Image (cartoon, coloured by chain):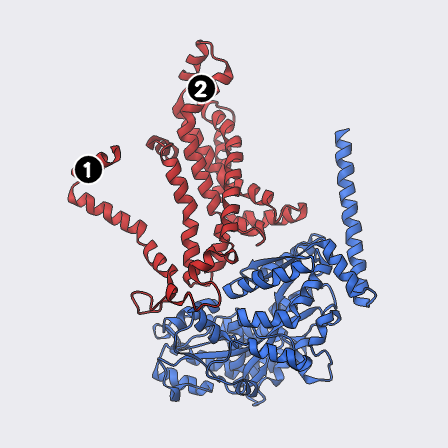
Chain colours: A red, B blue
Amino acid sequence: MARKSASIALNERLSPYQKLYLLLIAGFILGPFIPLIIQSFAFRWAWPDLLPGTWWLEQRERAVLPLAWDYVISPYSQVWEATLNTVFIGCVVTVICLFICLPAARVLARESFKGKPAFEFFLSMPLIVPEAAIGIALLMIFINIGLAGTYTGIIIVHLIPTIPYMIRMLTAVYQGLGRDFEEQAMILGASRWQILRMVTMPMLLPGIVAGALFTFLVSTNIFLLTFFMGQGKIVTLPTLLFSKISGGTLDASAAGITLVVTVPGIILLLITERFIKEEAFGKGFGN
Amino acid sequence: MRKTMLSLSVIGSLMTGVAFAQDADAFRDGFIAGDISWEEVQARAMEEGEVNLYYWGGSDQINIWMDRFAVPALAEEGVTLNPVRITGTKDAVDLVLAELGSGRGLGEGSVDAIWVNGENFATLMRQGAVMGAFADKLPNSVNFEWNPEDPRSLLNLRDFGVETNASEIPWSGQQYVCAVNTDRVASDDVPSTFAEMRAYLEANPGKFTYVKPPHFIGNTFVQAAVYAHNPDGTGAEPFQSSLDELGAEELARLIAPGMEYLREIEPLLLGGDSGNARYPEDPNALNGLFLNGEIDFSCQFGLYGVATGLRDGTYPEGAEQFIFPEGNMIKNKNYLVIPANAPNPAAAMVMANYMASVDSQATKLEIAGMPPGVDPWRLSDEDAARLDAASPGLVGVTQAELDANTAPDTNATLVDVIEATWLEYIERDSEESISSIVATAVANLN
């Protein structure tokens, strides 16, 4: 109900130009999905046909092998395996990342120590150094210590590009928090655990959720490092997609897999939408 | 205390690792010497429990065949087949070499077998990274001609001219076949020689291109052009010798007219009118151009490519095969190689034996359209008939026509040089003469 009235209000508030602008933005975001969806249902779609000349459903009965969505949902496509791997790795990376970054962010936001600017710069190094350079060097080391081709190996390398993001977001949130509330609770006799549980955490939550969401999305999108460390044995959605479309053509099953790849991010966004207040993102990116 | 326990257990696991590796070495030597029976291999394979096959995973059909047929068949042998899909065979070769480089020997690596041929196999051989002569000792080796006296054994004994020493077993035999879109090209206009192709392109500029070297499908097109323009008129014959035997100067003389031709037709290829000819990177991209009618002809390995392409919608409805270039349609085989550091050598051999069986060859032919690698004259009539029945069929040509126009592959040592020459002379439009380009390429190799 609230949403509906809000949308009416929005409708009245916007000028026609603003509406057009919104429509264009929506077109840019959703537009690329349209040919993808059509392609995923096509059997043969050749230039210059505006729509597929033959649809997958027309050929479905005659097909010797599963085509299009039949292939995507069949175990042969490895989509299910890749999705599970992606979500599993993403979750573990997010949790570990939080445990590393929460205390670090607290210190970075509140304390000042010698060499802090240099340390902060050092923290963002992984964002500057190309992934390929890190990947190849690490692969050599990981092969030696037997971590190549294991989940542990992939999770460790995923921490490299995610920690800088997480630390930056959490530091920003901590800076906005101030010590006053915690001090007040302390004056009122709360223990440190109580303060953490009942004061700090609830106030940090939007920032933590935003950071976790971001970390998860970054982790699920890492291709190169996963490809190196997984050695093809551990399939995630990005590596699966790459092997499917690296040829430069998009057939029906590739289009289907591409659509599936976008699903975890969308679901996550829907789930977390209610947790996130605008300012969490705003602060996270501001700083 | 805890520390000593830990270091003890580390030492312990290292020692079992070493013991296992020695054990694997002994097993390999015993099998190659013929001291180990097939039953023992099977028993050991069951103990090892799994086998990691690395193969190019860009084809849905092959992936489905692997999961639907190969995995269950090996499960019956007590071996779990892990088909690892890779985008480039070179990745698996690099992985093997990297692991060997860090001291991981037999029983300690991660790749049990790779689907290879040509340069990738030559690289493994050069680096001493193959397990050894297993291929002619499997029970299903009887399906192949190993007798060097018989000229038909050539493709089993040599892979792009490099002696295989039975380190790899043939998996599939392919021929380079071109397809034409008959909805766009009248049957009288279909070229059968390179000269006719040029005439067609002069009348219809931009309607053809080929896969870009160094992709092997592109290399093969270049080789066919080089054969056809051989100044001595001896076709593929001199290209069977290695680089050392032939010499750089002689090679340059032999390939010059072919390279000249490829440079001359470049403005007539797809996008050539704007001075920037487009060469697709791989067969899937080529298929896309062919399907969209951007090109009228599409050349690649695939005896049954048109039949399966029509079946799954990746080829236009009017696609047919045709004989081009006359007498120079390159034929080769591709293989399964077991690397020197295979973690499960016995399971790898059980897997290779299954892949060499008539049963697997027939289902693979039917499902994935991959021509058999076994030699039909070595099979019983019944088995040979079974393979015939499984074939998805040729479209527009007959087997006899294909057989009459066969040419062998180029020696692997020459492939690198021809490839480098193409890249320099065609791709980078080098002003240098072909002989100096070849000389530089040869020097760079060593």
Mark 1 chain = A
Give the quadrant of the C terminus of chain B.
Answer: bottom right
Which residue occupies 47% across, 87% down? B193
Which residue occupies 45% across, 59% down? A70
**Of residues B39 and A219, the one drawn nearer to the viewer in this rendering:** B39
Q: Quadrant of residue B356?
A: bottom right
Q: Specify whether residue A132 is in view.
A: no
Mark 2 chain = A
Circle 1 sits on which residue? A8
- Does label 1 or label 2 sit earlier along the sequence? 1
Q: Residue furthest top?
A: A188
User: A263 left or right of B125?
Assistant: left
Vertical placement of residue A253 versus B400, above or below:
above
User: Do the numbered discs 1 and 2 sit on residues whose CB atoms are within 8 Å?
Assistant: no
Give SS at disc 1: helix
Circle 2 sits on which residue? A198
Q: Nearer the viewer, mark 1 or mark 2?
A: 1
For mark 2, does the 10 Å Cα neighbourhood hold few (<14), some (14 to 19), or many (20 or more) residues?
A: some
User: B232 left or right of B105?
Assistant: left
Residue B294 position within the rendered picture, expressed as x and y whole percent measured from the top left: 36, 73
For mark 1, does the 10 Å Cα neighbourhood hold few (<14), some (14 to 19), or many (20 or more) residues?
A: few
Q: Amino acid at mark 2?
A: Met
User: B116 left or right of B25?
Assistant: left
Q: Quadrant of residue B9?
A: top right
**Labels 1 and 2 within one chain:** yes
Give the quadrant of the N terminus of chain B.
Answer: top right
User: B127 left or right of A157?
Assistant: right
Which residue occupies 80% across, 63% down? B29
